[in-house]
Amino acid sequence: MRINRIGIYFFLLVVFSFTIIFEACKHKEETPINNEKYKITLKWNKAYELQTKQDVETGFIWALSFLGAELPKGCKADGLVWNANIVEVDFYRLGFNSLALEAISKLLNIFKQSEEFKKNGA
């Protein structure tokens, strides 16, 4: 009888441990954020004749990594959405923490209030 109790306790411990591990390792369900304060639309003007969107993306992502972006897998597709020479940048999707996002949102608000942004929408 004592062995059965130990076996049952061991079984429950194993199940409990796997449950905790499974929950901890489960990919965090991403809640969609449709918050415009973390987004900005930018207009790309070629700096030189052979410059490509890939060049621009690489440089932009590289610079953001120095600012603390985690840049999770697939973030470039989610965080940089192109339409011709206009790109919408979603800083939330690029993996900035909440403190950085609040600082970024203050800067974006200043940029969005500029005459150039109002005139061009980017």
Image: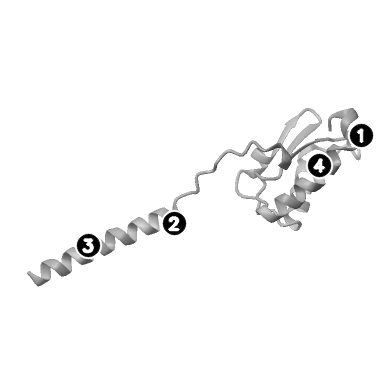
Name the spot of residue 1 as percent of width and height, x first.
7, 69
Q: Nearer the viewer, mark 2 or mark 4?
A: 4
- The structure residue drawn at horizontal position 72% and vertical position 50%, both measured from the top left corner, is 102
Work out whether residue 78 or residue 105 is closer to the camera in this orientation and state it.
Answer: 105
Label 4 neighbour load within 10 Å: few <14, some 14-19, many 20+: some
Q: Is residue 6 above or below residue 26?
A: below
Work out whether residue 83 or residue 104 is closer to the camera in this orientation and state it.
Answer: 104
Amino acid at pointer 2: Ala
Per the image, label 2 sits on a secondary structure element best described as helix
Name the spot of residue 65 as percent of width and height, x first.
72, 55
Snapshot quadrant of residue 87: top right
Q: Is residue 71 above or below residue 88?
A: below
- Of mark 2 and mark 1, the one earlier in the sequence is 2
Name the spot of residue 25 as percent of width and height, x first.
44, 55
Cα gap from disc 4 to disc 3, whole angstroms: 56 Å
Snapshot quadrant of residue 117: top right
Work out whether residue 77 or residue 102 is closer to the camera in this orientation and state it.
Answer: 102
In the rendered structure, the answer to whether residue 86 lies left or right of residue 34 reads right
Query: Which circle marks residue 24 in the picture?
Result: 2
> What residue is pinned by disc 4?
109
Cα gap from disc 4 to disc 1, whole angstroms: 13 Å
Whether the residues at callouts 4 and 3 have beta carbons within 8 Å, the answer is no
Query: Which circle marks residue 11 in the picture?
Result: 3
Name the spot of residue 51 as percent of width and height, x first.
85, 39
Amino acid at pointer 1: Glu
Per the image, label 1 sits on a secondary structure element best described as helix
> What residue is pinned by disc 1?
116
Per the image, label 4 sits on a secondary structure element best described as helix
